[in-house]
Amino acid sequence: MIERVLAATRPLRVPRGDRLPLYLCPVQTVPGDEAEIERQLKALDERGIAACATWAPGGGREKALETALRISQIQKKLGLSVGINAVSCTYTVCNGAPETAHVGADGQPFFDLSTVSWHGGPPRKLGCPFALQTRCAEIAEQTAFFCRAYKEKGIAVDFIWTDWEVDGPIEWNGGWEAAKRCKVCRGRIPGIDDFLQFQKAYRAKRSEVERTIYGSVVLEHFPGARVGNYAVYPNNGWRYWYDWFEQEPTDKAIPVKMEQRAPIRPWVDEFGPCGYTMAMPVFYTWGCIWTWYDWPNADYRWFHNLLQVASNAGQSTPATVPLVPFVHRTVIGAPPGFDPANNLSVEVYKEFLWHALLRGHDTFFLFCGDKELEAELAPLHEVWAESLAYKEFLDRGVPVGFDIPDKPGPVVSGLLLGNRLLVRRTDFEDDSGPVELKVGKKVVRVKRSKGKCQVFDLK
């Protein structure tokens, strides 16, 4: 897999400097002996790509530790960031053990079975959030085992991520109904019949679980680590996308706001309570997005939603918190009859990536399957490598302009650094004139410049 990554990319023309590297789901281990691992790590670094070692608990954890340490020790030797994939360490809290079940008014245990555990898999047995203490302690030890071993070897973790999603307290699908049936939840969640009160309490318990099993464990051992989880990031109180296992709510008591046919959901602050030090939003072209909007311009249906997610996270996240979004271009979960010709075009996808960078995001984390690797990686690496020419703006600039047109039209994003302004403009119609961008007390007229950034001197 790494050889395919190397073949699909080229060494950087502009040094990365202190910019965060690119992360790729296919590069979650590095095979070979020490010499071969070192060769691959160096070649990846020349392209600005980081590798992660994988922590895998269970019966083979000693072997997994040995493999991970070998990679991480070489990263340390080369002065590279030590990256860790901790996905396996965080599962499974809700394992169906009887003591984790909800309890009905009749005293009988039951589980929320409305959410599948993986694509095409059986339902996850989601239990009562107030009955998970024992499981949390057991799962926390899975991460702690590797943390202790790394600390003993003098290797500090710099970057660590997980994808903990279909587990623990989930308020969507049948989660609310299950909680209302549970006498423990009814006794512990005031206002449980009000969805917003319920959601606030449920997400607080979910955040507590995440912090207990993962975030606080890592930071206790490595206080300087960038620690994050898929889809957990600061927000403006709303979520503009649905994960693969989430169903659009049909209960009228859930207060969504509609944009055409897009049911935008209320969301609570979970990033702070989780204690994470790295935000990881999700920029995926989910199939439902295509069905939500009526614009004939296919690209704008995707672009509009992706920019909503990117702007929400970029505007809500402090500059001191790294933003490392997951990205994917081609449709995930295509609706019936979907024509692949209506996928987000490569050209407009690259434009979106530029706007994400200029709206505060620091790098990207590519999600893709084996068959998609080259097609997904090429445009992403191209934009990221080209963006390094503006790394001074990206490192120290302040985003200006988070506007999102409610119909296809010109889109402008910018970064202000002192008296200089870096701007990207993307057009979705042919006859747009200059766009006025307000920067402090000044107004900048941004003309069309297809496929190029513009730099303005505001002195």
Image: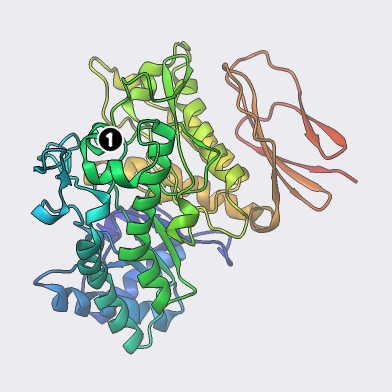
Tag 1: amino acid: Trp
* Nearest to the observer: residue 107 or residue 370: 107
* Nearest to the observer: residue 359 or residue 97: 97
The image shows residue 18, relative to residue 258, as above or below, that is below
- Please report the residue visible at 37 percent of the width from the left and 18 percent of the height from the top: 252
The image shows residue 375, relative to residue 152, as above or below, that is above
- Please report the residue visible at 44 percent of the width from the left and 56 percent of the height from the top: 10
Q: How many marks?
A: 1
Question: What secondary structure is marked by label 1?
Answer: loop
The colour scheme used here is: rainbow
* Nearest to the observer: residue 188 or residue 356: 188
181 sits left or right of 259 in the view: left
Q: Is residue 21 visible?
A: yes
Q: Is residue 97 visible?
A: no
Q: Position of residue 226 (x, y in %)?
A: 46, 65
Mark 1, Cα crowd under 10 Å, few <14 / some 14-19 / many 20+, is: some
312 sits left or right of 283 in the view: right
2 sits left or right of 315 in the view: left
The image shows residue 18, relative to residue 344, as above or below, that is below
Q: Position of residue 324 (x, y in %)?
A: 47, 53
Query: Which corner quadrant of the image does residue 380 belong to?
Result: top left
Q: Mark 1 highlights which residue?
A: 244
Q: Position of residue 144 (x, y in %)?
A: 28, 75
* Nearest to the observer: residue 239 or residue 205: 205
Q: Quadrant of the N terminus?
A: bottom left
- Please report the residue visible at 38 percent of the width from the left and 67 percent of the height from the top: 43
- Please report the residue visible at 28 percent of the width from the left and 54 percent of the height from the top: 26
Q: Position of residue 114 (x, y in %)?
A: 18, 34
